Structure formats: C-alpha cells, structure tokens
C-alpha cells in the first residue's frame, strides 16, 4: 500500500501546482492512514526539495544534512510517532466537532420530554421513564438516545438485575444532568438548552453558509423563520419563555459582577442614568448598596409603564428614546445595549450621550469585549461564541476594544479604562469626552 501511495503521489506531482500538491497530499495520506509516508513528506526533519524538469518530469532531490542522514533510528521512530499522534488527535477533534449536533439535539430531546425531572434523584429503568411520558414512547429510541447522553456526561447508565439471569438498563442523573431539572427553576440550565437548540434557532444556523456567501442580506434567523427575531418572540410565547428564562438566570450574576467590578464609591453624589435599563434592576441594586448615587433608569415609554419597582425605591424611572435625547446627568450607564446596534446607530447613541453629559462626564458600558491579540481566537472564548450567536440572530454584535475605540472616537469619546469582571459576558469600559484642542 505504501508503494501504491507513492505512485499516486508522484503522478499527482507532475500535473498540479505546488500549493494544490501539498494540501491534496495531506488529505490523501490522512484518508488512507499512512503515517510513515505522511511523516516523511511533511516532517520538518526531512528537508526534501522537489524539481520539475523542462520535460515535465518530477524528481525528488534530497538536500538532507548529514545529521539527518545519520539520524538515529530512535529519533526517526520518535518523529513518526509524534506525527501519528498529531494526526490522530486532529482527526478525533474534527470528528467530535462534526458530531456535536448529535449530542445537542439529544439533549434537547431530554429537556423537552422532562426526563431529568422524571429521573429526579433515583435510578430508573427505561420502561419506568417511558411510563411517565405521554402517548406511546419508542423505548428503543429512548434507550439509545440516553446512552448517547451518557457518553457526554449528562446521564449515568446502570445495569439492574431482574428475575432470572437477565439485567435491565437504568439511568440516573450526573451532576450535569441535575442542572437540567426544572424543579429548581432559579438555577436550572434547561432554558439555555431549549433556547439554543429549538428548531427555529437550529434552522437559523443552517442558513449560515448562504449568508456568508452573500446570497441574501437578512439575518439567518429571519431567513429561516420569515420574520425578525423581535417579531418572532412577540408571537411565539413558548420560545419567548425559554429566552426570558435565560435572561432571568444570568441577570443576577451579571448585576453582581458589575457592582463588584467597578469603584462605584467614586460616583458618590453624582447622577447616573441607565439607558435601556428595562425595569430598573441594575439601578436598584446600585442604589441599595451605594445610596449616595442618584440613580435613574431610562427605557422606552411602554417598557417603563410595565415596570413594577420595589416599594420605596429611590430609582427614578424615565420614559424616552435614546436616539432623540437622554436626561442630563454626570454618568450614562448602558448594559448590553451597544451589542444590539450597528456601528452607525451606536455612534448616534453616543452622540446623545455627549449632549447629555458635562465636559467631565463619563459613559460606562457593561458589555462583553472580544479578545484581542494574535492568538486571541486560538483558544475557546465565551465572548466569541456569544458574538457568533448575535451574528445568526441578526443586527447585533460584540466588539473588540479597538473596534469599540473606533466607534467611540466618531462620537467624540475615548476609552479611559477596561476592567474584566467575574462574568465572561460583561466587561466594564469607561469612556470620557475627547478634550477639544485649541
């Protein structure tokens, strides 16, 4: 098989340009799994060059150093073993990535059918689980899907003895599976699963190739569901329930992260307006801990009208439109507002802030910042995943510090400081007005 591969390679070498030769060779050797040939051609230790004659014939010219020619067998074997290990690791990683939707859709099934709640803190057989489901469940499909979820750490499989010598398969919850129970709604991660993996969102991701290819301009979500995400949640109450459940789960942690991640005492005696602040939860938390700060919350009139502030709350609720005007204040605060708007609209928002603030006024943004630097995207990043989700749903984006700086400059602001918080979805960025030069 090695000789056959070499013949194939040499024939390909005659008729294709260098770049195509390299990538096709990698693909071929990966497919037929010839690690020794792979290592020989691609290891930096081989130092081989290739020559094409004027007649189109290819030959291999060995320009190996003496140290390579007399390399010990041990070093050669080590090089080949390392090449094989890298290849095996890469193949495994790609296969896991390509199969990720297997487990995510199986997880969606488990949450939709309420299986974590059915199992509770017990060990239950497939038939016992099936007996709690509506209709006539497919027990074989249930068994096989739950085994898949065992392999990714959601359930644990057990073999229970029965009468005679046979055993029956049963399942219990892993620590991860416990987090999917809805009996403790305040800490359940079930809304995340339903929100991210339900069919409307799943269909939106399937439109990503054509969106990237420029075959349509609306968002992938709108293309897949024939309406914007805002209109969708207005008309689909069950999906809105999942989305709101996600917000309820992450909001308390984010609020605490904002309080702990900034020196709010420095704003004592100042007036702060939370623009796009909803029902005032963020400002109520700040006012409770820092009563010397005058806290206002501004949102659309219909949002403010629906608010139910706590009794004796010191926070003043203000209805308005941030694109038109913002009440005069010392500090404008915005949490997860910028990510909802394009650069052009974000400049308009900051221009409203500029008009509302005195020369020494500040803008505080509580948003995720994308990582920056040469290797920033080579590691798994929660912020990058958030930004990809915003891309699919449409009209929203996270920004890096440099991108945010460019937007701020267009509205007469500069970045003073950036602070990380305990929440990966929140960085605290302070902006100040650019001083006019005489």
Image (cartoon, grey):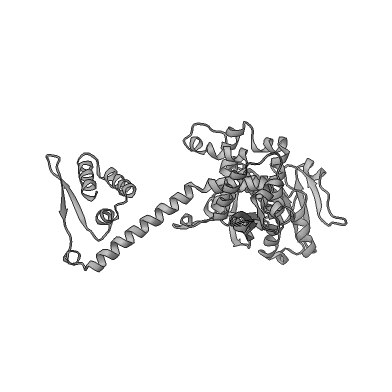
Residue 359 position in % (x across, y down): 67, 55
Given residues 197 and 64, the one toward you in this image is 197
Residue 370 sits above or below residue 325 on the image: below
> Is 48 situated left or right of 215 in this image?
left
Q: Is residue 118 visible?
A: yes
Given residues 212 and 67, the one toward you in this image is 67
Residue 282 lies in what quarter of the image? bottom right
Residue 119 lies in what quarter of the image? bottom right
Q: Is residue 350 visible?
A: no
Given residues 298 and 227, the one toward you in this image is 227
Residue 72 position in % (x across, y down): 21, 68
Please, which residue is most extreme toward the front here?
164
Residue 197 position in % (x across, y down): 61, 44
> Is 19 situated left or right of 96 in this image?
left
Q: How many marks?
A: 0
Residue beneath the point at 57% across and 34% down: 218
Residue beneath the point at 52% across and 48% down: 100
């Amino acid at each position: 098989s090695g000789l056959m591969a070499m013949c194939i390679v040499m024939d390909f070498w005659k008729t294709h340009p260098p770049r195509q030769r390299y990538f096709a060779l990698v693909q071929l050797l990966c497919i037929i799994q010839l690690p020794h040939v792979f290592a020989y051609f691609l290891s930096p230790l081989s130092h081989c060059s290739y020559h094409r004659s004027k007649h189109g014939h290819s030959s291999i010219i060995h320009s190996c150093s003496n140290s390579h020619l007399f390399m010990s067998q041990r070093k050669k074997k080590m090089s080949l073993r390392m090449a094989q290990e890298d290849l095996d690791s890469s193949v495994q990683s790609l296969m896991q990535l390509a199969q990720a939707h297997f487990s995510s859709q199986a997880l969606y099934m488990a949450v939709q059918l309420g299986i974590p709640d059915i199992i509770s803190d017990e060990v239950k057989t497939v038939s016992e689980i099936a007996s709690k489901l509506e209709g006539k469940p497919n027990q074989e499909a249930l068994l096989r899907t739950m085994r898949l979820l065992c392999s990714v750490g959601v359930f644990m499989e057990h073999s229970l003895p029965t009468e005679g010598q046979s055993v029956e398969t049963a399942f219990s919850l892993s620590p991860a599976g416990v987090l999917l129970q809805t009996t403790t709604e305040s800490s359940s991660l079930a809304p995340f699963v339903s929100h991210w993996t339900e069919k409307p969102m799943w269909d939106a991701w399937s439109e990503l190739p054509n969106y990237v290819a420029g075959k349509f301009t609306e968002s992938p979500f709108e293309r897949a569901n024939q309406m914007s995400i805002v209109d969708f949640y207005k008309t689909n109450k069950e999906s809105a329930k999942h989305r709101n459940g996600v917000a309820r789960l992450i909001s308390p942690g984010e609020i605490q992260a904002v309080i702990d991640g900034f020196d709010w005492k420095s704003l004592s005696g100042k007036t702060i307006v939370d623009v796009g602040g909803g029902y005032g939860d963020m400002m109520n938390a700040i006012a409770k801990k820092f009563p010397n700060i005058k806290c206002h919350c501004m949102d659309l009139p219909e949002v403010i009208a629906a608010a139910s502030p706590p009794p004796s709350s010191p926070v003043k609720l203000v209805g308005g439109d941030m694109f038109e005007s913002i009440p005069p204040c010392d500090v404008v605060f915005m949490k997860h507002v910028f990510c909802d708007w394009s650069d052009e609209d974000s400049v308009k928002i900051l221009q409203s802030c500029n008009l509302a603030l005195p020369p020494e006024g500040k803008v505080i943004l509580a948003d995720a910042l994308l990582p920056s630097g040469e290797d920033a995207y080579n590691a798994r990043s929660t912020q990058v995943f958030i930004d990809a989700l915003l891309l699919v749903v449409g009209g929203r984006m996270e920004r890096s510090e440099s991108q945010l700086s460019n937007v701020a400059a267009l509205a007469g602001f500069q970045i003073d400081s950036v602070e990380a918080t305990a929440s990966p979805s929140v960085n605290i960025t302070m902006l100040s007005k650019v001083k006019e030069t005489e």
